[in-house]
Image (spheres, grey):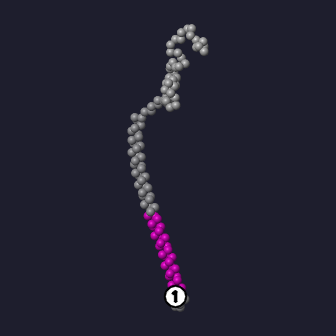
Amino acid sequence: MTFKVKLLVIAVVLAGVGLGGWTARGWFEDAKRLAIVEDRQELAEQIRGDISGIAQTVEARLGELRANERIIDRGIIREIQKPIYQRVCAEPDVVRLLNAALRGESIPGPAEPSVEVPSGTSPAEER
């Protein structure tokens, strides 16, 4: 054999070994991915089974509760609050008058006399 033929045979063997190694590495990576996918599918199936069991238990319990179910409709309740004036900027007499007016009461104030005015007295004559 000549040197060129030996070199060609060595190159073919090296190329075959390289191609075989590359193919084997691909098979190894595919096997790892397949194992991961199978594990995930098994876990998903187990979770589905657990959830299915829980759903069946809840459905059975709800089936028992529907016999006791009642609907109560009471309408709408509205609560109206009226403001109560407090002394912030006004004197206590003004606050008392405002609160009395809010309640609908009439309180005699300085504009209304507390007693009957005698007939014959007129404030216009005094001026």
Residue drawn 47% across the image and 68% down it: 29
Whether residue 17 is in magenta: the answer is yes
Task: Decide which of 20, 74 is in the foreground and name it.
Answer: 74
10 to the left or right of 39: right
Instruction: From the top left corner, tell me how far across and down residue 87 is, in percent.
Output: 49, 30
Whether residue 54 is in magenta: the answer is no
Residue drawn 47% across the image and 73% down it: 24
Region rendered in magenta: 7-35
- Residue 40 appears anywhere in the view: yes
83 to the left or right of 46: right
- Residue 81 appears anywhere in the view: no
Instruction: From the top left corner, tell me how far across and down residue 4 is, in percent.
Output: 55, 89
Task: Decide which of 109, 72 is in the foreground and name it.
Answer: 109
**Which residue type carries mark 1?**
Lys
Instruction: From the top left corner, tell me how far across and down residue 40 is, in percent.
Output: 44, 59
The furthest residue to the front: 127
According to the picture, the residue beneath numbered tag 1 turns out to be: 6
Task: Decide which of 120, 1 is in the foreground and name it.
Answer: 120
Instruction: Name the image quarter holding residue 5.
Output: bottom right
Task: Decide which of 1, 126 is in the foreground and name it.
Answer: 126
